[in-house]
Image (cartoon, rainbow, N blue to C red):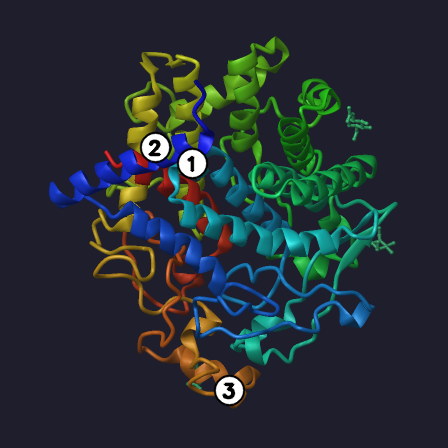
């Protein structure tokens, strides 16, 4: 007798719903509604949409915007996401966001109720449709818009700033953005494989093309003088190439290996690990630095397939995990008195969500292969990694010294004055007349709450003292970004299925 995967999935979802019900009945103070948080974390992406909005757009205070993007160069670059509280489309962090949304679906999609899995795929496609436009001409990567935007406090729907297009083409280099775009398209092809094989194939072919460009002309696009002013100081690859976009090349190759099973890419990560810097134990993971994520991703093949040549990736992943476990004897990542993972530099929640995600992914890889991590004085298993991840996610949702949920619209108390243009200005529905560039300043300065609730947005979050002032001007703490939310989608899905 055979059982269809759909039946199994349904049975699984029914069982997890029963678990959720039991959990709701047996409530304690630290219980969270992970399903509510998951739904909201995905809904947030609708608030960041650029381009023509569909009829089923759920955040109704948004409207069409950026409809002329690309026209200054005679090309169609409509769509994609505004990366944060502004109206700029930066391809580099957008691609990273997409990779992490896709990775969320790949690892934890089955833990999502079917309708949220669908919403997550829609959120990915909003970005991949745009990324496909940027790689449509071989060797060309369009890298987004200018700084002028930042001088305005303006709704996306009113944008009247110059929408300059920055692009790089062969033989000039763009390894970091092209490598990350390859990763995003390859990971997304895996997320879509079961649901839309044709689209998955298109994504994979374009991923290969983007990677070939990234690898053939090695170097960072942010080093190019004509592009630099547009991307720096916001999203320069500080981590750089050859100190630098080497991590995006390996990351792109690792995703292509996983999506295609093509040995060309396995050889690439085996042979170039050292020269491209993978063997440095760099305990970072975010839009600028892929090392810790790369090590976790590649470890899967080492753990499951015993590909001995990949051992160094697994060792680096292990040592990263040990820094996250307080009882281990290795040197530790900073944890605030309230229990939050902290790294200097602002927008701290990006580290919290991406590290919580890696903890859960690595825990799954270890659990499936019955392995543990040797952290010197102690052996660390999946349960400890999941416990640390849960502490981080619960902190975000309200278990913190401020007693505040850092996700807008979740729980009884959440940030009211986020650094986000559209959220803080009257919506085009309530106020159809345009609000010009500088006319928004009064709303920016206002001490009142934002009129439009950007449901699901997670802000940069508190400082190392766990204090959060809810101050719109303090963008390091009060601005949401797409790459804070993307890994959170996967982590929340895990806790929907495994609430305790
Ligand atoms: C920067 O990139 C542009 C577009 O690809 C190219 O025309 C220009 O020569 C590059 N400049 C440098 C200094 O590499
Ligand atoms: C593997 O990838 C390489 C590089 O993209 C390509 O040339 C080759 O045809 C691929 N092999 C298969 C079996 O698809
Ligand atoms: C907004 O605040 C800034 C700095 O506090 C001040 O200089 C400016 O005059 C204010 N503008 C408006 C329109 O309230």
* Coordinates of residue 438 in the picture (x, y in percent): 54, 84
User: Helix or strand or loop: what does disc 3 sit on?
Assistant: helix
- The residues tagged by marks 3 and 1 sit, at their Cα atoms, a distance apart of 47 Å
Quadrant of res 375 = top left
Q: Are marks 3 and 2 in contact (CB under 8 Å)?
A: no
Residue located beneath label 2 in the image: 12
* Coordinates of residue 299 in the picture (x, y in percent): 53, 20
| Nearer-N-terminus badge (3/2) | 2
Residue 477 left/right relative to 159: left
Residue located beneath label 3 in the image: 439
* Residue at the image point whose x is 62% and y is 25% from the top: 278
**Callout in the foreground (3, 2):** 2
Residue 11 left/right relative to 351: left
Quadrant showing the N terminus: top left
Residue 391 left/right relative to 111: left
User: Helix or strand or loop: what does disc 2 sit on?
Assistant: helix
Quadrant of ligand 1 in image = bottom right
| Nearer-N-terminus badge (3/1) | 1
């Amino acid at each position: 007798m055979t059982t269809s995967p759909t039946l199994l999935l349904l049975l699984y979802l029914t069982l997890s719903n029963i678990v959720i019900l039991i959990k709701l009945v047996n409530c304690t103070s630290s219980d969270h509604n992970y399903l509510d948080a998951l739904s909201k974390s995905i809904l947030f992406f609708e608030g960041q949409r650029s381009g023509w909005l569909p009829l089923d757009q759920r955040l109704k205070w948004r409207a069409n915007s950026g409809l002329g993007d690309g026209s200054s160069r005679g090309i169609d670059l409509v769509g994609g996401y505004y990366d944060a509280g502004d109206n700029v489309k930066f391809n580099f962090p957008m691609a990273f966001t997409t990779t992490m949304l896709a990775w969320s679906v790949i690892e934890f999609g089955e833990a999502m109720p079917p309708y949220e899995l669908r919403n997550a795929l829609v959120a990915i496609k909003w970005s991949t449709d745009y990324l496909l436009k940027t790689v449509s001409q071989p060797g060309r990567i369009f890298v987004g818009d200018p700084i002028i935007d930042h001088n305005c406090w303006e709704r996306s729907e009113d944008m009247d700033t110059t929408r300059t297009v920055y692009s790089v083409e062969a033989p000039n280099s763009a390894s970091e953005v092209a490598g990350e775009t390859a990763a995003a398209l390859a990971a997304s092809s895996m997320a879509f494989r079961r649901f839309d094989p044709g689209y998955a194939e298109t994504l994979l072919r374009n991923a290969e093309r983007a990677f070939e460009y990234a690898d053939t002309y090695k170097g960072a696009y942010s080093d190019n003088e004509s592009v630099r002013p547009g991307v720096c100081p916001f999203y320069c690859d500080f981590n750089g190439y050859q100190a630098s976009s080497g991590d995006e090349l390996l990351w792109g190759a690792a995703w292509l290996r996983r999506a295609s099973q093509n040995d060309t890419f396995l050889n690439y990560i085996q042979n170039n690990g050292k020269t491209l810097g993978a063997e440095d134990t760099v305990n970072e993971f975010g839009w600028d630095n892929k090392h810790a994520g790369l090590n976790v991703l590649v470890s899967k093949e080492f753990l499951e397939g015993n590909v001995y040549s990949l051992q160094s990736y697994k060792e680096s992943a292990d040592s990263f995990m040990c820094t996250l476990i307080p009882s281990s004897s290795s040197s530790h990542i900073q944890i605030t008195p309230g229990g939050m993972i902290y790294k200097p530099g602002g927008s701290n929640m990006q580290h919290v969500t991406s590290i919580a995600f890696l903890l859960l992914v690595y825990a799954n890889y270890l659990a499936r292969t019955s392995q543990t991590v040797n952290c010197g004085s102690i052996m660390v298993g999946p349960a400890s990694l999941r416990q640390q991840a849960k502490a981080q996610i619960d902190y975000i949702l309200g278990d913190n010294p401020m007693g505040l949920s850092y996700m807008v619209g979740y729980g009884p108390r959440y940030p009211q004055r986020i650094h986000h243009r559209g959220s803080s200005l009257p919506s085009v529905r309530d106020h159809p007349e345009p609000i010009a560039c500088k006319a928004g300043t009064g709303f920016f300065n206002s001490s009142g709450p934002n009129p439009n609730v950007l449901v699901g947005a997670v802000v940069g979050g508190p400082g190392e003292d766990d204090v959060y002032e809810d101050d719109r001007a303090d963008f390091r703490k009060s601005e949401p970004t797409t790459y804070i939310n993307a890994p959170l989608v996967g982590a929340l899905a895990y806790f929907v299925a495994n609430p305790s």
